[in-house]
Image: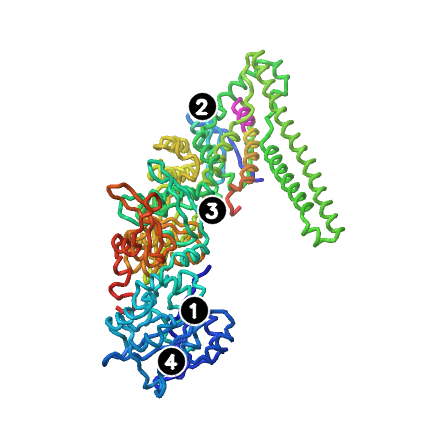
Amino acid sequence: MGYMKIDIHVHTKKTKQGDATTREIDAKKFHEIISSTEVKIVAITNHNVFDSTQYNEFVEAVGGAFQIWPGVELDVLEGDRKGHLIVVVSPEQANQLEEAIVKVSIDTSPDNFNISISKVISNFDKLNPLYIAHYQQKKPHLLDEDIEQIIASTSNKNRVLKEATNAVSAGIFISHGHASIYGSDLQNWEKYQSISKNLPDLRLPVESFEQFCLLLDKDQKAIDTLLDKKSHEKIIIKPFKDDSPLKLIVYDDINIFFGAKGTGKSDILTAIANYYSNKGIACSKFEAGSDTLEEVYDFNGKNLKPDLNDYDIDYCSKEIELIKNAQEVRITSLSKYINFHKGSQTNKKANKIKIKDFLEVDTKNSERQFKKIQTSDRKVKEFKEFIVQNTVIKGILTEEKFDTLILILTEAIQGLEEKSFEEFSNGKTAHLFNGIIEKFKKEVSRKTGAPTKPSETGFRKYAENRINIEIAAKTITVNINKKIKSTKDYVGNLDEKGDLYCKTEIAIQNGKFSDGKFKTIKKSIKKNTQKDFSKKIANIRDKVYTHDLFEEISELNQLEDIDKIPTILELLMFNKIFTTKDSEYKPSTGEASMILLHKELSEDKDVYILDEPEKSLGNEYINNVIVPLIKEKAKSGKKLFVATHDANIAVRTLPYNSVYRDHSQEGYKTYVGNPFSNNLVEIKGSQEKLDWKEVSMRTLEGGKEAFGERGQIYGNP
Amino acid sequence: MVTHEADIIKIDKEYFLALNLQDNVLKIAITQDIPKDVQNVFNELILSLKNGVFKFLLKEQEDADIYYDIAKEYISQLNLELDNIYKEMNEYNLLDTDN
C-alpha cells in the first residue's frame, strides 16, 4: 500500500485570455503524463468552465489508472474583493457541475465571469463539493471573512479546505516549497513530471471522492477501514517495573510515542526492542546521544581485532620464542684434544678400538632433505586429488591426456615416497652411527680411564644455533617492516563539507615508527616496550655473529612486560580519524548526532527503534533529512517506533499510530490514536478521549509551527 | 673448493692453530682454553662461509709433535663441519647474494 499524491488543481484548457496555451492538453497526453507520476487523484479545475465532453473523454482514456475529479476554479467577487475559489465535486456529479456552471455563466464569457459567495453556495452546495480557497500567499485570495462566510453557509464545513489543520486531518502530507499547498495550478504540461514531485502525499490510500470527504469528516469507520488495510499486529509487552502488560496495535509504518519526560517512553522502546529480538528480528534501540561518534567507530580500538594473515604478515610466534629462549652452545675446548692425545699414547689396547675415533657424521642434511621430500609428497598428493575431483579439467583435456597427467603425478608420488624412505633411512643410519661412536667412546673411557676423543669441534652446533637466531631475527624484521594499507569506511554526508569517512591506519612498531597519535591495539602493552622490542630484534640481527649476541638477547628478555609480546600482533598500533576530502576533520556534536542517526536509518532493517532522534539536531536537518528518511522507511513497509518530543517528527510524518503517555495524580496512562481520527483514546479503563491535535500542540516542541498556525507550511516564509 | 692454509705457531711459549683466511689470520690457542676467543674465530668462519665454502690444510711438519696431531685432528673435524654449515646456509638462503 504505497503513498499516493493528490493534485486538486490542474488546468486542461485555455478558457481565459490570460491562460497560457500550454495549459491545453489532449486525453492521450493527459493519461501519459499523469501515469508517469505518483499522482493518483487529479481534479480538473479550469477557469469558470467545466467541459463534460473533455472530462468524459479523459475518463475513458485513463480507464481507471487514476481518479479524475471534476471541478472548476471560480472568480469570486465579494464587494470589491476578487478571489479564486476551487469547487470540486464527485465524478458522479460531473454533469450536474457543468449544468450549474452553465446556469450561472449565461451571457458572460469566462473572462468576464464572477460570482458572489452566496451564489456559489446556492448553486453548487447541493452537489456536496469540496471548496478550496486561495488563501494568503496564493493570489488572488479571499479574506478570512470570506472563507468564514463559506463555512457558515455550506452544509458541510469540513469540506472547506483553507489551512493546514484540515489538510492534516485529511491525511495530506504537506510538501514544502510549493506555491500552492493543494494543487499544481498547472501552467505548462511539459513540466508536470517535475512539478508533481512537490505535490502533497496522501498518507491514507483514498479510493474515491466520497472516501476523501469521509476522511475530512474524520469518520472513524472510514479511517479504520483504511488503517486496517495497512499491515499491523498486536503486541503485548511488559515495559514497566510493575510487570503490567501493555497491549499495542503496531503498524508497518510510523509508530510515535510522545508525552512528557519520565513517562516511560524509553522503557516501552526497550521492551519493543526485546520483543522483536526475542522473535529473532534484528533490532536495537537507537538512543541519541548515548554513544559518541568516536565510540561507535571504535576509536579506542576495543573491537579492532586484526588478523595478520589478512595482510600477508606472519605472526612469528616461533621465531620470537626461539630468540627469547636462545642460549649459547658450548664448544669443544682444546684441552679435551690434548687430554685425549696424552691419554691415548699410554693405552695401547684402547688404541686398537678404531670405531671410537671415527668422526661423527652429519645428520642435519638428511633431516632437511627428508622434510623437503615430505612437503613435496604431500603437495603433489593434494594436487592429484584436486585434479581427480575437478570436472572442469576433465572436460578440457582429452581422456588420454588426462590419464597421462594422472600417471605422471602417480609416478612422481611413487618417486617421492622412495626418496623419502631413502632420506629417512640415511638420517637414522647417521644417528645410529653417531650413537655407536659415542657409546664406544664412553665405554673405552670408562674401562681405561683415558679421556675420549672429541667427536666434533663444536663449530657445527655453534653455527647452527646462530644461524637459527639469524633466520628468526630476519623473519621478524621482514614482517614488522611490512605496511598495512589503511581502510576508509563511509560514515555519512556533511552537505557542502562533503562525505565523512572513518580512516583506520594500522602500523607495526618496527623500532623506528614514531607517531604520537597511534595507540597500541593490545592495551596491556606499553608503546615503549613495543619500540624497544623491535630495536632489540634489529640489534640481535646485526650482532648475530658477534660476541655481544647473548647480551642483546638477555636485554630483550629484561624488557618490561616482554612476556606480553609472544607474536608480532602485539606490536600493532592504530590510529582512527575522521576525514572529509582526504583531510582530517573533527565533526561537531550536532554533526555527530546527524551522522549517527543517518547511519541508523541507512541500515537495512525491518524494525527501527529510535529514542528521541531529534537530540542535538537542528530543525532544518530534522525536516529536510530525518523526516523524509522516516517517511521513506514507512513507505517501504518498515516498522518504525519513535519516541520524540519533536512535532516535526510526531506530526509532520502523519503516523499511523500515535501513543501518548501521560502522568498525573491518577498515575500513568497510555492513549493511542492517530492524526486521521484526531483522537487519542485511553487504552485501559476509562476509554477517555483526548484531542490528538490539542495534545500534540501542547506537549510537543514546535507543535504550533507543525500545525501551520503561523502559515509557514504554505511554502513561502 | 677453496683451500686455506693452517699452521701451528708459537707465541711466547703458547701454541696456536693459525687459520689463514685471505686477509685475516684466525688464531685458536692449543695450549690454553679460552672459549671466548674460539667463539670469535667461529663467528669469523661463519661470516667467511657466507662468501663461499672453503677448507683448511695443515702445513706439514717434519717433526710432528702432539700439537701437530691435535691440530690435524681438529682441522679434519672442522673441515667437515664447515662443509655441513655451508650447505645449511645455502639451504636457508643465508649466503651473500653476490656469490
Task: Specify how the rendered protein is coloured.
Answer: rainbow
Q: Which amino acid type corresponds to the residue marked 1 in the rendered image?
A: Ile
Near mark 4 (Cα within 10 A), the count class, few <14, some 14-19 or many ≥20, is some
At 68% across and 45% down in the image, what residue appears? A389
A13 w.r.t. A633: above or below: below
Write the start and end of the magenta stretch as one range: B66-74
Between marks 2 and 4 in the image, the one whose residue lies nearer the viewer: 4
Q: Which amino acid type corresponds to the residue marked 3 in the rendered image?
A: Tyr
Near mark 1 (Cα within 10 A), the count class, few <14, some 14-19 or many ≥20, is many
Q: Which amino acid type corresponds to the residue marked 4 in the rendered image?
A: Ile
Between marks 4 and 3 in the image, the one whose residue lies nearer the viewer: 4
For the residues marked 3 and 1, what is the alpha-carbon distance in whole angstroms? 59 Å
The reply, left or right, for residue A133 in relation to residue A409 is left
Residue under circle 1?
A41
Closer to the chain start, of discs 4 and 3, is 4
Closer to the chain start, of discs 1 and 4, is 1
Where does residue A501 sit, x and y in percent of width and height? 37, 54
Q: Do the residues marked 3 and 1 share a common chain? A: yes
Which residue lies most toward the bottom here? Answer: A107
Where does residue A117 sit, x and y in percent of width and height? 29, 76
Q: Quadrant of residue A491?
A: bottom left
Q: Are marks 4 and 3 in contact (CB under 8 Å)?
A: no
Residue under circle 4?
A101
